[in-house]
Amino acid sequence: MAKKSMVEREKKREKLVAQYAAKRAALKEIANDETKSMEERFKARLALAKLPRNSSPTRLHNRCQLTGRPHAYYRKLKVSRIMLRELGSNGEIPGLVKSSW
């Protein structure tokens, strides 16, 4: 199980990303628009830099929903490899069969 502080930090980041998504997209559009003046584009980039760092979607990290484990994460199931194996052994994931040879 991951530290609760790390899981909570990730939740806080997700909330900030959602909160600033529209503002960030608008500023990026202005900053990348070639038809705008250089001064206007530069001001948009400065405003973008003033936004909180944790509001950037690249700072998000996928975590297992059951344990909070950050590595070996299956996007389709939103669980880690360890929980996938455990749930599969218990028969809780339809169509997943534990192999043995």
Image (cartoon, helix red, strand yellow):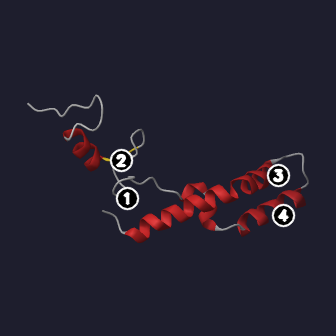
Mark 2 or mark 4, whichever is nearer to me: 2
| In this picture, residue 88 sits left or right of residue 67 | left
Can you identify the residue that label 4 sits on?
43
Sequence-first disc among 4 and 1: 4
- Which image quadrant for residue 35? top right
Sequence-first disc among 1 and 3: 3
For the residues marked 4 and 3, what is the alpha-carbon distance in whole angstroms?
Answer: 9 Å
Which residue is drawn at the image coordinates 78% and 66% (left, top)?
46
- Amino acid on which the number 1 mark rests in the picture: Gly
- Which image quadrant for residue 77? top left
- Amino acid on which the number 4 mark rests in the picture: Lys
Can you identify the residue that label 3 sits on?
30
Q: Residues within 10 Å of mark 1 (few under 14, many from 20)?
A: many
Q: Is residue 54 above or below residue 29?
A: below
Mark 2 or mark 3, whichever is nearer to me: 2
Can you identify the residue that label 1 sits on?
68
Q: Quadrant of the C terminus?
A: top left
Helix or strand or loop: what does disc 2 sit on? strand
Sequence-first disc among 1 and 2: 1
| In this picture, residue 26 sits left or right of residue 12 | right
Query: Where does residue 79 sit, x and y in percent of width and height?
Result: 36, 47
Sequence-first disc among 2 and 4: 4
Sequence-first disc among 2 and 3: 3
